[in-house]
Image (tube, helix red, strand yellow):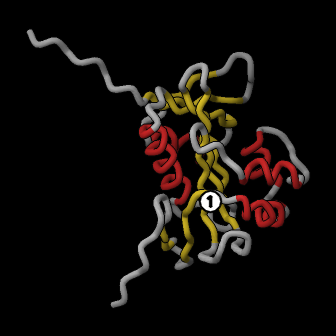
Amino acid sequence: MALRERLPPWHEYQRLPNGREVLIRPIRPEDAVPLREGFSLLQPDEVRQRFLHAVKELTPEAADRFSRVNPKTEFALVAAEPLPPGEALVGAVARIAIDDASNDAEFAILVSHYIAGMGLGRYLMTRLVKWARGKKVHRVYGDVFEHNQPMLQLAQSLGFVREHMQEAPGLVRVVLDLEPPPLQAAS
């Protein structure tokens, strides 16, 4: 059996239950065009659940902004065809950004319906949390529509707790505390 080439950090091949292989890797500036092209393949509800409002198209400026991250405060992974960046269709994007004021980090995940329900959201979320732990983030949070049961169930299964948002009816904030519990004094 041939050994696979050694992959750079945060790069992993995953075989989905349907047999399709995807490459999970950090987003690259070359992904801007595939992000725009793939946006039209998304269903309106998928877009609304990610952006929390209707978005008709992903502008070149938005795609460029999404594909460039500040490595000190942001991290984004894509699940893409195992082709070079810029050529690969992107089927999922997971992002996290640290708020400097609070040292909390907000996440967002979008998994296309073509590969939804195959454990990719769970896997991507665990990678975001791992990155956040490495950055000494206090809490990871995301805002989710209260009817988005798959995301709410995923968050709960990973230890997130729900916080209802009075100022945003219909949204639930899911929060994962990453700070270690205080040490108990020996009695």
Q: Look at label 1 and name its amino acid.
A: Val
Secondary element type, mark 1: strand
Residue at left 66%, top 20%? 165
The quadrant of the picture occupied by the C terminus is top left
Q: Which residue is mark 1?
A: 78
Residue at left 64%, top 57%? 27
Query: In the image shown, does 19 or 150 lie closer to the viewer?
Result: 19
Report x, y in % for residue 86: 73, 70
Query: In the image shown, does 111 or 4 lie closer to the viewer?
Result: 4
Report x, y in % for residue 172: 64, 29
Report x, y in % for residue 2: 37, 89
Residue at left 59%, top 37%? 73
Query: In the image shown, does 147 or 36 lie closer to the viewer?
Result: 36
The part of the image, by quadrant, that contains residue 89 is: bottom right
Residue at far bottom of view:
1
**12 relative position to 69: left or right:** left
In the rendered image of this protein, does residue 108 appear above or below residue 140? below
